[in-house]
Image (tube, rainbow, N blue to C red):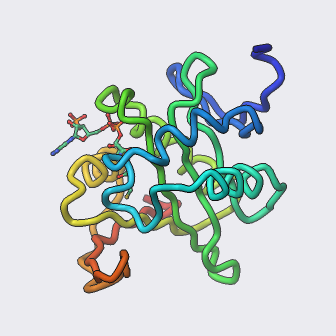
Amino acid sequence: MNPTDREVIITREGVSLGRYRASDFAAVHEYATDPMVYRYAEWGPNSVEQTRQYLSEASMQNSEALTLAVLVENQVIGGAAVWTTNADHRCGELGYSLNQKFWGRGYATLATRMLLDLGFSYLNLHRITATCAPENSASRRVLEKTGFSYEGLMREHKLIGDRRRDSLLFSRLVTD
Ligand SMILES: CC(C)(COP(=O)(O)OP(=O)(O)OC[C@H]1O[C@@H](n2cnc3c(N)ncnc32)[C@H](O)[C@@H]1OP(=O)(O)O)[C@@H](O)C(=O)NCCC(=O)NCCS
């Protein structure tokens, strides 16, 4: 693979966020069908069509959202996104998922720092929120390490299958 044919948006300490390519299907589908990755998510396991759709939507130009591959040594190790939720109020949200093989090396923390940079600069957001399941200690820790403030528990916030689930709400302001 030619390392120059992917658009890299931002890099920090060896981790990059870049545009997806159609050839990333296998790498994305691997973590999007791993029960350990989607166990706290409202999506998953992805069908082949859902992964294709995700890649197709991610590659569309969008001035209010960035859906990007997390890259280490030009290998796709996960996905990360930041998007506008309310354009009038310049509010947005971010999220991330990594292939289990790459957990515990600080990569999500670096990816989140870069998403914050992009959210506040490229998307011109004032406030960025993130949510996680109360049991998702790793995600909670990532948000704490990247300077998010805990705002509270949102009761029965998500419908996952036929079960309602609480979420923890975190935020960061451009002024924090
Ligand atoms: C959440 C996720 C992205 C974290 O990725 P990661 O690259 O392992 O994260 P980092 O290495 O940057 O940081 C993880 C932190 O959580 C801690 N952690 C991991 N598992 C933990 C657990 N079970 N309990 C408490 N802390 C835990 C790590 O020790 C580390 O903190 P530290 O640096 O203070 O030691 C990854 O686990 C993942 O993809 N999970 C599935 C998808 C998901 O849950 N996405 C978020 C949805 S809200």
Where residue 61 sits: x, y (%)?
Answer: 84, 55
Give the vertical position of 165 relative to 128 (above or below): below
Question: Picture quarter containing residue 29?
Answer: top right
Q: Relative to the observer, which residue lies in front, 52 or 74?
A: 52
Q: Is residue 129 left or right of residue 17?
A: left
> Which of the image's four quarters has the N terminus?
top right
Ligand 1 falls in quadrant: top left
> Which of the image's four quarters has the C terminus?
bottom left
Q: Is residue 101 left or right of residue 60?
A: left
Give the vertical position of 58 relative to 72 (above or below): below
Where residue 17 sits: x, y (%)?
Answer: 62, 36
Give the vertical position of 7 relative to 28 (above or below): above
Question: Picture quarter containing residue 18?
Answer: top right
Residue appearing at x 57%, y 56% in the figure? 47
Residue appearing at x 62%, y 39% in the figure? 69
Q: Is residue 111 left or right of residue 9?
A: left
How many callouts does the rendering have? 0
Where residue 94 sits: x, y (%)?
Answer: 51, 59
Q: Is residue 122 left or right of residue 95?
A: right
Q: Relative to the observer, which residue lies in front, 11 or 138?
A: 138
Where residue 10 sits: x, y (%)?
Answer: 66, 34
